[in-house]
Amino acid sequence: MTTTPTSGAPASATGTDAPLLSATDVRTAFHTGRGLMQVVDGVSLTLSEGETLGIVGESGSGKSVLGRTLMGLITNSPGTTVSGTVLLGGKDVHATTPAGRRALWGTEVAMVFQDPMTSLNPVKKIGTHLSESVRLHLGLSRTEAQERAVDLLRQVGIPEPARRAGQYPHELSGGMRQRVVIAMALACGPRLLIADEPTTALDVTVQKQILDLLQSLAEELRMATILISHDLGTIAGRTDRVAVMYAGRLVEYADTATVFERPRHPYSSALIASIPRLDLPPHTLLPTIEGSPPDLLNPPPGCRFAPRCGAATDRCVTDAPGLAPYPGDRDAGVVVACHHPLGAAEEAAV
């Protein structure tokens, strides 16, 4: 394993010396009429070629904003403050010019957005959506770009791709539109794909098809993937590592199997407990997390999860925990932001 970053976030699980993506102390704040809203607050993580990272947390935890910040879609502006370092393939995403960032989009990094209908121009044909980017970035002729568009539709499993390329977004189902958005993201062969809630508003069967498609394409193309979701069940078995976010901060960062088998942060444990299970009797009520996430305009001084945590102490209310390696040797490589990580006291007594 590579060296653990000084922030406490573990390095990539693949053991490469030069990760494809390296984010250090990333912060994104929005200037609002009520004050400064710190939506991403000191996130550090790494990702290697071919690795898949899941970012999970409740709605409003900062997942989508983090994804857009890593991609360079959110930058410093009169209404936004971004700090920290994001290196993609050794290039500083936020230190480059707007033209330099546009050159990265599509070829180095691409994103699959939540709602495929709003990602597609309703007055442009499907083939046009796909051919525009390959003509711009790859320099293909119009005919070559059209052929590439049909090949991409075939690659993502759309039947009759040549006919579909001549249709408009409203003529396709929601699942097919999402496949088109995935094809758009893959058009120029990016090294990193960020999928932000890619199964939103799709039925369960189509959700599985889309997730299976993303997984198979990532394996086939050796593409690094960040899968953003509010549901831990969505990323089970589909990621190498999991970063759990709460109120703009990482609270746990570990390999996927460890998070599911032995979650160390109370928030991670509560999220896993809320997943429906087939072995439970019918009509069993699932546990819920009482209370609401904090107001990011005025977050609590200590642990941001403390008001909703049954194990919180006076220290948790006043002293914000930083990411630190889990104590003990059993879960080496796990980092958790908690003064009283689950299982630590019991293992220390053994």
Image (tube, helix red, strand yellow):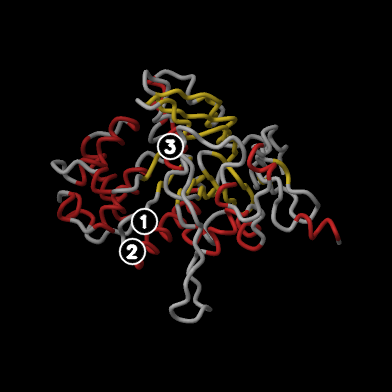
> Is residue 39 toward the left or the right of residue 120 in the image?
right
First in sequence, mark 3 or 2: give its number: 3
State if disc 1 and disc 3 touch (CB < 8 Å): no
Residue at x-position 47% and y-position 36%: 296
Q: Residue furthest right?
A: 350
Q: Which element type, helix, strand or loop, lies under badge 3?
A: helix
Q: Which residue is mark 1?
A: 199
Quarter of the figure that contains the C terminus: bottom right
Residue at x-position 46% and y-position 48%: 228
For marks 1 and 2, give the CA distance: 8 Å
Q: Nearer the viewer, residue 52 or 289?
A: 289
Q: Which residue is mark 2?
A: 206
First in sequence, mark 1 or 2: give its number: 1
Residue at x-position 24% and y-position 34%: 141
Q: Measured from the top left, where is residue 171 in percent x and y?
A: 15, 55
Q: Which element type, helix, strand or loop, lies under badge 2?
A: helix
Disc number placed over residue 65 in the picture, else none: 3
Of badges 3 and 1, the one in the foreground is 3
